[in-house]
Image (tube, rainbow, N blue to C red):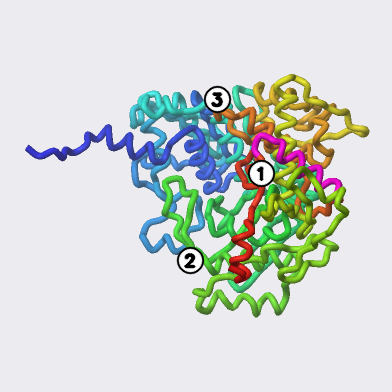
Amino acid sequence: MGKIKELEAEVFRKIAAGEVVERPLSAVKELVENSIDAGAGEIKVEVRDGGKRFIKVTDNGDGFEPDDIEKAFKRHSTSKLNRLEDFNSLDTLGFRGEALPSILEVSKILLKTSSNTEGKGTFCTFEEGKLVEREEIAFNKGAAIEIQDLFYNFPVRKKFLKSERSELNQVIAFLEQTALSNFHIAFSLSNNDRLIFFYNKAATLKERIYQVFGKEFLDGLQEVNFEYGQYKLNGFISKINTGVAVKKYQHFFVNKRPIRERTLFAALNNTFRRFLEKSKNPVGILSLEVPPREIDVNVHPMKLEIKFEDSSAIYQLVKRGIESTFGSSGGAAADRSLDFLYRDKSSPEQPPDAFTASPGQTAPGPGFAQAQLFSGEIAHIEEGFYLIGQYLNSYILVEKEGALLVVDQHNADERVNFDHLKKEYRENKVVSITPLFPIIIELTHSEVSRLDERKQEMLSKVGFDLRPLSGNSYDVKSFPQVLDERSIKDAVLTILHLQQGDVDFEDKVLAEVACKSAIKVNHRLSPEKMRSIVKDLFRSTNAYFCPHKRPIIVEFGREQIEKLLKRK
């Protein structure tokens, strides 16, 4: 007897639905994108328990025609395309006809809708995959779709849902991103009847960024407006030589669709690499317009990923667009450099220089070491240790028992700070200081949502005293003594984005404070300071790796050096 059996209809329908609806975020995403496609000017999202118990999306879009209601909840039904060729000109977010039937497969749905301006609407109840009630009601043009008891009949999926806060954070992050790409639409979100945010319609992306992230964040950005033929790149990026501690602020929209695509992220981060410290990341809120025929949006169940027909050309386009804001290219020169869109793109891009001078600093020539020779008193660190100098204002050169050590000054200082901070933390003796002038930090709604009781406790233990003000503002009453005031917000944001489930969560918090307080690269040190760092480093718990597991020291033995110089 054969071993292969056909799955029962109920089983394969649940499996198929699970590919589209993984968690509350999935349902919110599908409904909100349908509202956008329906031409809504206002979208209201309400959830309870982070969406695990209740989700409702209300809009003022076109609404359902009475004859279309039952069809919309059947599989493979859509108003977005008719033929395979329509994929070449897709301009909608949804198109598969899987969202509503997939949600219905794992929940109960109530629908109120109207497609007219006369106030005549329809109310429907769907359960167990079918319509069970329908009546005429008074309802304004638009739709309100209510999802009850998500995964009530799919316990295997339900038990893997995370906490209310975790599920809610994902919904907030999605809606923030969607609001950025659809600034002409008003959005609101509430959880358990508590309003989390309301963004009124904005006239420009700049105005929407201000609504979502605040004035301080916006002031650190510069605008991108780049066009080449049918390709357009618009939005905002960090000002040169500035950045943030987390990669959360990198958003890409391709033909108005929020997208995660490695080519785009690589183009942004690689272009900024030589202008930022390694602990910093560029901000990028960028909208890319390309001919629809050159992308495939049908490669991910939730339509989060796409494929470009020519990813290398898109990489170059984004790179040149970003560079044009730095004043390094533009006008006719930029046009000439962009002929890669119409020629062979097989030649790889040259990697950026390994070392780049900071503003106002002359870059050293190849092989040039900024070495400083000191008196014996300063050069001598401990028995067998001698300070040679500093290379590129970033690396301390040390002679140790005949070997040459290249010490990363940032990682070394981070290790020393971490050990000191951890000792204070264990003894409940972390030293805090009060700022001379008031320090106010603005958080986004998703960041406030991440500031739960445990993280508030950890922030307090490492020396922070944050007092809530109106909105999402916090007054920094005190902060760890090891930090300077410019690093406070970066440290807080990085801690907020840490995963609490990790066993070494406390160490990760301490490591972030230590990192933000450490001496940076491209920073000239006095001989006394270099000597102090190296001396403290070799008294630390691990002189060869920083708390983030990055190497601190590269060692060259005498034999290795002599072999390279052909002396052996």
Amino acid at the residue labelled 3: Glu
Neighbour tally class for label 2: few under 14, some 14-19, many 20 plus, Cα within 10 Å: some
User: Going by the image, does 529 lie left or right of 56?
Assistant: right
**Disc 3/disc 1 C-alpha distance (Å):** 23 Å
* Mark 2, secondary structure of its residue: helix
Q: Closer to the N terminus: mark 3 or mark 2?
A: 3
* Mark 3, secondary structure of its residue: helix
Check contact, mark 2 vs mark 1: CB within 8 A. no
Q: Position of residue 418 (x, y in %)?
A: 71, 34
User: Going by the image, does 371 lie left or right of 284?
Assistant: right
Residue range highlighted in magenta? 527-542
Q: Position of residue 276 (x, y in %)?
A: 72, 55
User: Going by the image, does 214 lie left or right of 175?
Assistant: right
Q: Disc 2 designates what residue?
A: 294
Q: Residue at x 58, y 54 (%)?
A: 253
Q: Is residue 490 visible?
A: no
Q: Closer to the N terminus: mark 2 or mark 1?
A: 1
Neighbour tally class for label 1: few under 14, some 14-19, many 20 plus, Cα within 10 Å: some
Q: Report which quarter residue 417 is drawn in.
A: top right
Q: Disc 1 designates what residue?
A: 246
Neighbour tally class for label 3: few under 14, some 14-19, many 20 plus, Cα within 10 Å: some
Q: Residue at x 53, y 47 (%)?
A: 38
